[in-house]
């Protein structure tokens, strides 16, 4: 039986051999990294444009996202105090879903077709239906992992908060995708990521986020990557500060809560058809209030002796 011999460096456990890594998730990490390289080459070698961007940009972005997602989940499962079969099987299910998603996206690129919200032909509609169902399955599998982390006692409190908040906020970001699938466009089609303007219009470099209207992909992206951002906050506090364990735990809780509110504010901004870089006075005031409250709570956490 494998065990974890861990020490604490920073705020997150440093894993020593042997480690209970979820191998399917590591294989997915490697496969997605290979696809990212191939897709990056496709961006430069294939001159086709789809929805206003290079046709291989979507598989590149999804591949990179799955590299970070799969590795982070594998790490989280590896540092749990006890092996959990439901969590391990959920990881395997996530691998299957990811493979299906990436395969469909690449297949549609090879066909010169869009993969998301495409109902133009029976085949396109079938592939989109499979993608929608698979994302729901992935969401439920991550819920299982989240429940397992809540039930297990992780000795390092900042790490425990970081892992649980990271999983929770990333589930929020994942759920925001349902707003995109339920939008009705001016042409009567169901499903779009832009608000107030058609999909495929002027967008930011690389991300393609709309620069003329709202874009729900922004809060979706930020929310998903809470899975990495919040644990990194815990690591930074442990690595580069000398704060007590309880203070670092409070700061992670404050930072994770602020991150969740940020995701909601970005969603609110998008639903009001505002580009990310062109917020109105009300939106700016909301972001300023979040920053002020977060800073004040952080200072109070650091100076509190209880």
Image (tube, rainbow, N blue to C red):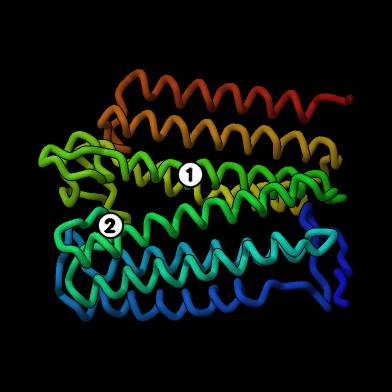
- Indicate the position of residue 23 as horizontal and vertical percent values: 66, 77
| Quadrant of the image containing the N terminus | bottom right
Query: Could you tell me which residue is drawn at 63 percent across and 62 percent down?
Result: 90
Q: Name the mark nearer the viewer: 2 or 1.
A: 2
- Indicate the position of residue 284 as horizontal and vertical percent values: 39, 24
Query: Could you tell me which residue is drawn at 30 percent across and 65 percent down?
Result: 127
| For residue 146, side relative to residue 246 (left or right) | left
Which of the labelled discs sits on residue 173, or is there none? Answer: 1
Q: Quadrant of residue 19?
A: bottom right
Q: Residues within 10 Å of mark 2 (few under 14, many from 20)?
A: many
In the rendered image, the vertical position of residue 6 relative to residue 136, given as above or below? below
| For residue 83, side relative to residue 97 (left or right) | right
Mark 1 lies on a secondary structure that is helix
Which of the labelled discs sits on residue 116, or is there none? Answer: 2
Query: Could you tell me which residue is drawn at 14 percent across and 72 percent down?
Result: 48
Give whichever of discs 2 and 1 has the lower sequence position. 2
- Indicate the position of residue 225 as horizontal and vertical percent values: 52, 51
Judging depth in this view, the residue of 300 and 231 nearest the camera is 231
Cα–Cα span, label 2 and label 1 = 17 Å
């Amino acid at each position: 039986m494998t065990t974890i011999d861990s020490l604490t460096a920073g705020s997150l456990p440093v894993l020593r051999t042997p480690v209970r890594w979820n191998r399917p998730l590591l294989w997915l990490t490697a496969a997605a990294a290979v696809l990212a390289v191939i897709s990056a080459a496709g961006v430069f070698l294939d001159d086709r444009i789809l929805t206003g961007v290079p046709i291989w940009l979507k598989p590149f972005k999804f591949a990179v996202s799955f590299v970070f997602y799969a590795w982070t989940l594998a790490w989280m499962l590896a540092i749990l105090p006890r092996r959990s079969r439901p969590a391990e099987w959920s990881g395997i299910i996530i691998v299957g879903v990811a493979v299906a998603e990436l395969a469909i996206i690449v297949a549609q690129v090879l066909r010169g077709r869009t993969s998301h919200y495409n109902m133009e032909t029976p085949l396109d509609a079938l592939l989109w239906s499979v993608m929608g169902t698979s994302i729901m399955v992935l969401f439920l599998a991550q819920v299982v992992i989240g429940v397992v982390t809540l039930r297990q006692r992780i000795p390092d409190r900042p790490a425990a908060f970081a892992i649980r908040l990271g999983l929770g906020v990333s589930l929020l970001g994942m759920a925001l995708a349902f707003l995109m699938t339920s939008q009705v466009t001016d042409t009567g089609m169901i499903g779009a990521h832009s608000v107030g303007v058609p999909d495929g219009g002027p967008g930011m470099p690389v991300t393609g986020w709309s620069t003329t209207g709202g874009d729900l992909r922004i809060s979706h992206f930020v929310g998903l990557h809470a899975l990495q951002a919040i644990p990194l906050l815990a690591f930074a506090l442990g690595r580069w500060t000398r704060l007590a364990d309880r203070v670092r735990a409070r700061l992670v809780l404050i930072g994770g809560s602020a991150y969740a509110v940020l995701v909601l504010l970005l969603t609110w901004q998008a639903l009001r058809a505002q580009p990310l870089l062109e917020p109105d006075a009300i939106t700016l005031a909301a972001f300023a209030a979040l920053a002020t409250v977060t800073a004040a709570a952080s200072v109070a956490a650091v100076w509190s002796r209880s």
